[in-house]
Image (cartoon, rainbow, N blue to C red):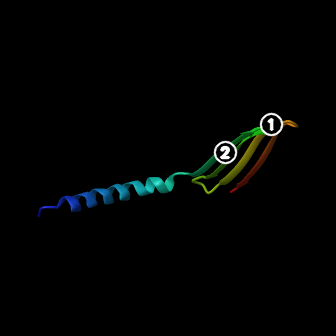
Amino acid sequence: MVLSSRALATTVLALGIALGAPAAAAADARFQSVDSFAGPQGSGITVIRSVVADDGTVTYEKVTYSAGPDGAQVSRTHSAAK
């Protein structure tokens, strides 16, 4: 039986997905966002990071560094759950 190129391509893709899916499921899930701002009244940067680890631990962190005419400041929010 001769396989067409379409059937062969479909088989190869299916095998790749089947073999790659367990590795993707075992990986940590991560999100990160970085935003910055600058203007006449000051500047700053905000970093947001969230991670769900393999063991189910969830962490979230938001940090903002800013500086302006009235000085500099850091604002931090951190949360974790197991």
Q: Amino acid at mark 2?
A: Asp
Q: Are marks 2 and 1 in contact (CB under 8 Å)?
A: no
Image quadrant holding the C terminus, namely bottom right
Position of residue 39 relative to residue 21, above or below, is: above
Q: Pick the residue in front: 24 or 48.
A: 48
Whichever of labels 2 and 1 marks the residue nearer the N terminus, that label is 2
Secondary structure category for the residue under label 1: strand
* Residue 54 located left or right of residue 4: right
Position of residue 63 relative to residue 80, above or below, is: above
Q: Amino acid at mark 1?
A: Ala
Q: Quadrant of residue 35?
A: top right
The residue sitting at 77% across, 49% down in the picture is 77
- Distance between the alpha carbons at the discs numbered 2 and 1: 15 Å
Neighbourhood count class around disc 2 (C-alpha, 10 Å): few under 14, some 14–19, many 20 upward = few
Image quadrant holding the N terminus, namely bottom left
Q: Quadrant of residue 11?
A: bottom left
Q: Which mark is residue 67?
A: 1
User: What residue did someone put label 2 on?
Assistant: 35
In the current view of this chain or complex, which residue is farthest to the left? 1
Q: Pick the residue in front: 72 or 29.
A: 72
The residue sitting at 72% across, 48% down in the picture is 62
Q: Which mark is residue 56?
A: none
The residue sitting at 74% across, 53% down in the picture is 79
Q: Residue 80: x and y, percent?
A: 71, 53
